[in-house]
Amino acid sequence: MINLHPKKQLGASTLMISALLLVTAGLIITFAGGYSALQQKTVKNEYNNNQAYEAAETGLEYALSFLQSNSGTVLASPSGGFVNYTIATTTLPNNATYSVVITNPTASDYSVLTMTSTGISADGSSTHIVSQQASNAGGAVSLQYAMTGQSNIISSGGITITGTNGLDAGGLFISSGQNNISSTNQNDAALASQTGAALFQSIFGMTPAAMKAKSTVYSSSGSVPWGSLSGVVWVDASVVSAGTITAGSAASPVILIVNGSFISSGTATINGILYVMGATTTSGNFNLNGGIVSQGQITMSGSTFAYSAPILQRVLTGSGGNYTKVPGSWRDF
């Protein structure tokens, strides 16, 4: 059969091809538009995530700096052996924010702290959490026992030592009262055989002369402003007091070094470490929150003695702090 209308068939084919091309072009344009929007969203999400990550990292750096200058504040109020200190939310110039929580992973051990920083992007769409541990690197002070005496330790009225660290005596521990002490170690030959200078260096990591050079020095007991002491205090004479003396506070403890004997028959409250190069004799009300080392005999009656790990840790770190990052402890959640 002869086709009498070839031009009409050719026109129909052209129309179909044109329609197909038009649909294909529309699909390509739609896909390109959707892909472009997806790319923009991906870039925006990546930008916000990076912004949150950088805010979190900034929080970690700030937390370490904060620790180095405010360790006493961070460790001031542990609960059940744990600190949970929050650094308030801080807004950065790009409007991203960070907040940091500082905790200790092991109960009553404040030598290693965990800083957890949460960063949030400026628009609030992205959150990033990173953590880093910091350890007390510079605390050369090493105090194993709450009470250390190179000679005898004699108690006639009862001694109370709270905490897990008790007393260590180079000689005998003689008690005629009711004591509450977690552990006692007497006749410690290694302790008794040490020279005073060697014991001092084992505690503080430096010679007495070096420690004195970095201390606030008072020539006599009467010249000491007891109510306003801070840092490392060196009294270059015996301390004899029948009145009231106070050294340091829970938030700002001191290292009190007495180049002589320490004799108190009044009321004495000391927060920190008391190091006595002679004998120590206390009666009346003697309250020490921290630790004591005496190169001579310790004689106590009616004393309340509290071993305080947080206070000792603040003494170890000092007001300037000595916390540094623990290698390999960084985590990205």
Image: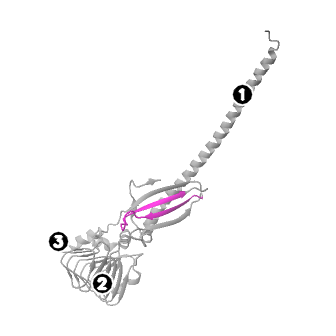
Q: Nearer the viewer, mark 2 or mark 1?
A: 1
Instruction: Determine the secondary structure under disc 2.
Output: strand
Chain part drawn in magenta: 95-119
Q: Residue at x 29, y 72 (%)?
A: 165
Q: Nearer the viewer, mark 3 or mark 2?
A: 2
How many numbered callouts?
A: 3
- Mark 2 is on which residue type? Ser
Q: Is residue 294 magenta?
A: no
Q: Position of residue 314 (x, y in %)?
A: 38, 71
Disc 1 designates what residue?
21
- Mark 1 is on which residue type? Leu
Instruction: Determine the secondary structure under disc 1.
Output: helix
Side (left or right) of 122 relative to 8: left
Vertical placement of residue 96 versus 286, above or below: above
Disc 3 designates what residue?
189
Q: Is residue 225 visible?
A: no
Disc 2 designates what residue?
303
Q: CA distance from mark 3 to mark 1?
A: 99 Å
Vertical placement of residue 118 versus 260, above or below: above
Residue farthest top in this picture: 1
Q: Quadrant of the N terminus?
A: top right
Q: Position of residue 187 (x, y in %)?
A: 17, 74
Viewer-side residue, 213 vs 227: 227
